[in-house]
Each structure stands twice: as C-alpha cells, then as structure tokens.
Image (cartoon, rainbow, N blue to C red):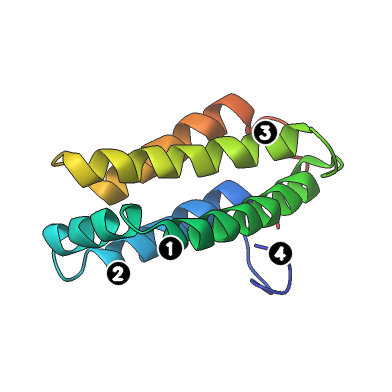
Amino acid sequence: MAEGLAPGRTGNTFDFWCSWLRRAFRSLTQGGDDRYRRYIRTRHANPSILGQMAAIRADDETLLCESLAKGFGMPAEGVSQPRLVAGMLMAGSSYVIRRFENDDIDLVKEAACVIDEVEAMFGYPLVERF
C-alpha cells in the first residue's frame, strides 16, 4: 500500500485493497473452505499467533491509513478520517473472516461488499488517483 509496496499502481486505495483481499482470500481458500476454517480456528486457539496477528493488523492499518491520507489529501496523523476509514476496512475484513469461520458464506464476495460499503460512505473525499 505504501509507495514502496506497490510501485506504479493505478487506481485508488479502495481498489487496491479490494484486489489484494480478493487475491489473498482466493489463495487461502484454494485448498477448500473447510481447510481455511480449520486454520482460522487453530489461529484463534493460539494466543501467541493472535498476538502476532494483532501486530500485523496494526501495521496493515497504518499502511492503509497512509495510502488513504494521500488519496484524500489529508494528514494521516492522529485520529483522522484516513485512520478511521482504515480501521473500518480492517474491522470489516475481520468481521467477514469471523462470519466465514462459522457460516457458509462466499468469503471473497463478502469482503468486497465491506469495501464497497466503506467506499460508498467515505470515498467522496478522494482528490487524486494513484
């Protein structure tokens, strides 16, 4: 998401996040939905894995925030709109994974719906395309 992670990308952060999640979730479910569900349950049962996942999530949220701030033409620091939108995108992804763990849902489709909802609410301040 930061310039060094996706040099030369086009589109906005919402497009990039949606494309990345689609690829990631398709890859994770390639061996079958039940296989990924077992992995999620194992991950949730292991506190050390959960701690590492929380650190990764925080890093991802910061990268999202920085990219959104650039697109919105706003500062990324503090409790800003880019920070809150990044948090919504991350929380939405976590929600979809929790639903997928217990329900028979289309993980990729539901993740894209979350992004579409957040973009519909907050995509208007975009001042530039990457």
According to the picture, the residue beneath numbered tag 4 turns out to be: 2
Which of the two marks, 1 or 4, is nearer to us in this view? 1
Question: Residue at 28% of width from left, 63% of height from top?
Answer: 26
Q: Residues within 10 Å of mark 4 (few under 14, many from 20)?
A: some
| Image marks 2 and 4: residues in contact by CB distance under 8 Å | no
Q: CA distance from mark 1 to mark 2?
A: 20 Å
Quadrant in which residue 16 is drawn: bottom right
Q: Secondary structure at mark 4?
A: loop
N-terminal of the pair, mark 2 or mark 4, is: 4
Which kind of residue does numbered mark 1 sit on? Ile
N-terminal of the pair, mark 3 or mark 2, is: 2
According to the picture, the residue beneath numbered tag 3 turns out to be: 84
Residue 110 percent across, percent down from the top left: 31, 40
Is residue 110 shown left or right of residue 6? left
Is residue 116 shown left or right of residue 54? left
Q: CA distance from mark 3 to mark 4?
A: 17 Å
